[in-house]
Image (tube, grey):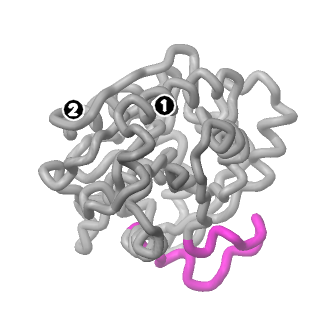
Amino acid sequence: MERTLVMIHGMWGTPHVWRHWRAFLEARGWQVSTPALRHHDAPPFAPPPGLGTTSLLDYADDLQAEIARMPAKPVVIGHSMGGLLAQILAARQSCAAAVLLCPAPPAGVFALQPSVMRAFLRIQLRWGWWKLPHRATYKEAMYGSFNTCTDRIACGRDYARFVHESGRVLVEIGLPFLDRSHAATVDPAAVTCPMLVIGADQDRLTPGAVVRRVAQRYAPVAEHREFAGHGHWVVGQPGWQDIATFAADWLERRLPAADTASA
């Protein structure tokens, strides 16, 4: 049986963000699934009703239900917000291993650094933002997601595919102390599968120091690696191949084919 892998996109993303990684991993023998999170299959400028109040837990429950239909626990790779969802799934014992790429932190890991606050300031100055859908402007995306991008045309094409995100999710991630549902809370003791945590030293959305604290939270099972010269867009910026190769090599050392093919 082929090794199975589920890839979880981040905020404003769609499965399209995985086009490079998916082709690369399939060529290495992985069977790859790239689901769209709830409401993320809508057109970029037409947020669907209900998106603004959708929760991280809705996303996690949808992913868990999809995984439950698989013949074996998959490996999960998550980018940004998808990295937090991967942590939630790992704590639910739903994956054989987890790879976190520039992950959003769980509750309890302080992340309100100046670059993060700048990236979301406009959104949070809008009354009712916590229950409304929101989409980054081009300027915000270039500052936060694409700050190390050398090909502005290619990054502009990626930005054009950005969709709206839930205001509630932004509260759950950025201000978890205001969230009564504790959606971003992850019990580190419940995470027992191998975990690789990858950061980037030029990341403005999940800065390297935040990613290091995420890795420390899961220290008994987690390994950490930070890539120099990279920003948040490790899924597609130049040099993504180096990061994908490192992650694939790590997975194949930690989980031989026989392990990922059995429940």
Direction from residue 252 to residue 38 in the image, left or right:
right
- Residue in front for this viewpoint, 189 or 31: 31
Q: In this picture, which residue range is highlighted in magenta?
A: 38-56
Q: Is residue 185 above or below residue 208?
A: below
Three-letter code, disc 1:
Ala
Residue 182 in percent (x, y) is at: 24, 67
Question: For residue 247, which numbered disc appears in the image?
Answer: 1
Asked whether residue 72 is drawn in magenta, I would say: no
Secondary structure found at label 2: helix
- Residue in front for this viewpoint, 228 or 218: 218
Residue found at the very far bottom of the displayed protein: 49
Identify the image quadrant of residue 242.
Answer: top right
Please state, as top left, top right, bottom left or bottom right, where the C terminus lies in the image.
bottom left
**Would residue 85 be visible to someone looking at this image?**
no
Direction from residue 136 to residue 89 in the image, left or right:
left
Question: Label 1: few (<14), some or many (≥20) within 10 Å?
Answer: many
